[in-house]
Amino acid sequence: EAGVAQSPRYKIIEKRQSVAFWCNPISGHATLYWYQQILGQGPKLLIQFQNNGVVDDSQLPKDRFSAERLKGVDSTLKIQPAKLEDSAVYLCASSFTGGGNTEAFFGQGTRLTVV
Amino acid sequence: AQKVTQAQTEISVVEKEDVTLDCVYETRDTTYYLFWYKQPPSGELVFLIRRNSFDEQNEISGRYSWNFQKSTSSFNFTITASQVVDSAVYFCALTSNSGYALNFGKGTSLLVTP
């Protein structure tokens, strides 16, 4: 079974530039998550989708971050404009359903460096 | 609000030693789920175990074991006879059916040296 695919693996941009990350979840998984992991910290949820609807985006900085999940499958996360503090690993995860009774599977992440 | 505390930032052990990683959680939910994930240098979070709040039985899987105690709100993870391949960052996480997404602790970095 293929895992969660993310691209690119690494990205370096200058502050105030834009960047987009892509995620392809495990086939059949209805729930998709984007997490931000700053160096030395645990992952923090940015947004959670159930199919193509948003379940939780309370911690998403909506003035600069946006995300969509077209047709309830692939998802993109965009940052515009980027700030230095956005340097982090962006992890995409998917699970069969939402809630705690199924585990989430994570991709390898995109490491973003903002200079 | 839910919170997970992993007080140990870094642990260093010599191969074959036993090591316990601590996890303390806070939640007002009566139904909740606890997880452990491993993050090797490659960066991908690897699922290790899930426990629901109604099941306090300890679990053993090979060299790994988990001790869940509701009385102390702890879900500790022990690696027996550690190996170099166990070197990674380990995260404890918490969710509930009302919260859905995982709330992670800050992680414990484990280094196992030969």
Image (cartoon, coloured by chain):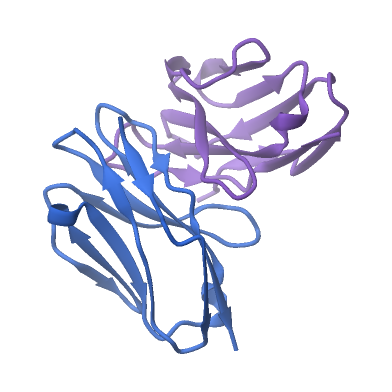
Chain colours: A purple, B blue
Image location of residue B27, percent across then percent down: 24, 37
For this view, does A114 lie left or right of residue B35?
right
Name, please, the residue furthest toward the front.
Answer: B7
Q: Quadrant of residue B29?
A: top left
Q: Residue at x 53, y 36 (%)?
A: A25
Q: Is residue B114 depicted above or below A55 in this figure?
A: below
Q: Residue at x 16, y 37 (%)?
A: B31
Closer-to-camera residue (A70/B13): B13
Q: Is residue B49 depicted above or below A59 in this figure?
A: below
Name, please, the residue furthest toward the top.
Answer: A63
For this view, does B112 lie left or right of residue A10?
left
Q: Is residue B72 depicted above or below A19 in this figure?
A: below
Q: Is residue A55 depicted above or below B1 in this figure?
A: above
Image location of residue B59, percent across then percent down: 22, 68
Closer-to-camera residue (B68/B4): B4
Image location of residue B23, percent across then percent down: 34, 56
Q: Residue at x 51, y 60 (%)?
A: B9
Q: Residue at x 26, y 73 (%)?
A: B60
Image location of residue B91, percent across then percent down: 45, 54
| Quarter containing the N terminus of chain B | top left
| Quarter containing the C terminus of chain B | bottom right
For this view, does B79 lie left or right of residue A67?
left
Count of all numbered marks drawn on residues in the image: 0
